[in-house]
Amino acid sequence: MQFDTIIKNGTVVTASDTFRSDVGIRNGKIAALADDLGDAGEIIDATGLYVMPGGIDSHVHLAQPSGDGIVMADDFASGTLSAAFGGNTTVLTFCMQEKGTTLRESLKDYHAKADGECYVDVSFHLVVTDPTSYVLGQELPALVEDGYTSIKVFMTYENLRLRDDQILDTLDSARRSGAIVMVHCENEDAIRYLIGRHEENGELAPKFHALSRPVAAEREATHRALSLAEITDTPVVIVHVSNRQAMEEIERARKRGSKVAGETCPQYLLLTADDLDAAELEGAKFVCSPPPRDKESQIACWEGLQNGTFELFSSDHCPFRYDDDSGKLNERGKRNFRWIPNGIPGVETRLPILFSEGVSKNRIDINRFVALSSTNHAKQYGLYPQKGTIAIGSDADIALWDPQKTMTITNDILHHGADYTPYEGLDVTGWPVRVLLGGKTIVDGAATTGEMGQGNYLRRKSLA
Ligand code: DUC
Ligand code: ZN
Ligand code: ZN
């Protein structure tokens, strides 16, 4: 037989086109796009379904050590299984440099955690927390050669943030090495000042997390990051953008000729700071950074997804259990918002939310959905066209979506390790009903047909 699998009768969707075609798969790759492809080992009937590239979530945190007895709720097994059920076939996670160690040492730890555990393909961004001359001068150029082509730097968190001179050195090394730099933009000193004021006033409930990280702190840091990137002439991604003022900084930098990509996330479309003001300590479930803002910011973020301010729609999945001493309600977190771990789960709900709120509600078309959920991530991070499209020669990483299927999101139906979802009770229209990785079905309806360890580690190209 010419093909291992044929997907018949579906509507193929890419970032640019929508067309009726069958899809022939051989040796894990897309081998033909045509009708009447003949027989195959397996025929999948996709009548009434969209045949789309599997989602690529380029902003996912798994198995990161969080210190002080705090434990992330997902390891690579549960996190990648959850990703698969959400219609994803690749996730890009973070390898966090432990201060005082090298990037290679940290990579060894993360590879050990991921090896043999993954249900979908994975690749690591490198988080630079200790930019020594060895790390920037020796390690980074060699690591880019080895396929680690993106790094992240933080402008907030006392123990992670880089000073401006360190950011400049890191951007400079990234440009020379051919790495792209993701930046978490919030002004740490302003946040410290505001946390101090709230503490003095005895304002310790979860809602003060949002009040201590205002739009001005994000806007200022975004402006500074873009200025430093302009000075060193380094392409950057401004990640998890929450509001219009930060978006305007991105647009202004683009007009000056800077190479900058923008990313936003589901929490900035559906949540507001009011969610952190829920009864008892329930607000802790929504503590993430930058925090969700207001209704106007949600409108702004939708506009950015429509008009191209944002190329990337990622989950920023960073899961902690809620009712758990190792999670949101740890002993200190119950008493003071500053000890509530920052981050919310979302790798499984990202695409159903974008499909339902975006495509089903006519805010974006189906091709834009594919661009924002898959293709642009592959292009941005050096995986295209192996990933992120339906084309001859691309990996057969495919999600079949039923655009009519209605579901109510509840934590019971999700596969992550968290004990809650911030989107409990949300009704959605459109659902990924079957997911193939390298031509093999890994999710079929509510069942897992994939195996742990089938996901591969991906070396990525440098785009410089
Ligand atoms: N930044 C992230 O990118 N994810 C979770 C927490 C944070 O501050
Ligand atoms: Zn961040
Ligand atoms: Zn993140």
Image: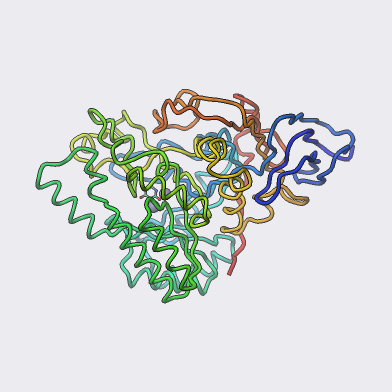
- The image shows residue 344 at horizontal and vertical percentages of 39, 39
Specify how the rendered protein is coloured. rainbow
Q: Is residue 288 above or below residue 230?
A: above
For this view, does 391 lie left or right of residue 245?
A: right
- The image shows residue 221 at horizontal and vertical percentages of 33, 62
Q: Which residue shows up at 38% across the image and 66% down it?
A: 225
Q: Quadrant of residue 385?
A: bottom right
Asked whether 413 or 461 is in front, the reply is 413
For this view, does 131 lie left or right of residue 337?
A: right
Asked whether 463 or 245 is in front, the reply is 245
Q: Quadrant of the C terminus?
A: bottom right
- The image shows residue 236 at horizontal and vertical percentages of 47, 64
- The image shows residue 421 at horizontal and vertical percentages of 41, 31
Q: Is residue 225 above or below residue 83?
A: below
Q: Which residue shows up at 42% across the image and 54% down it?
A: 96
Asked whether 287 or 126 is in front, the reply is 287
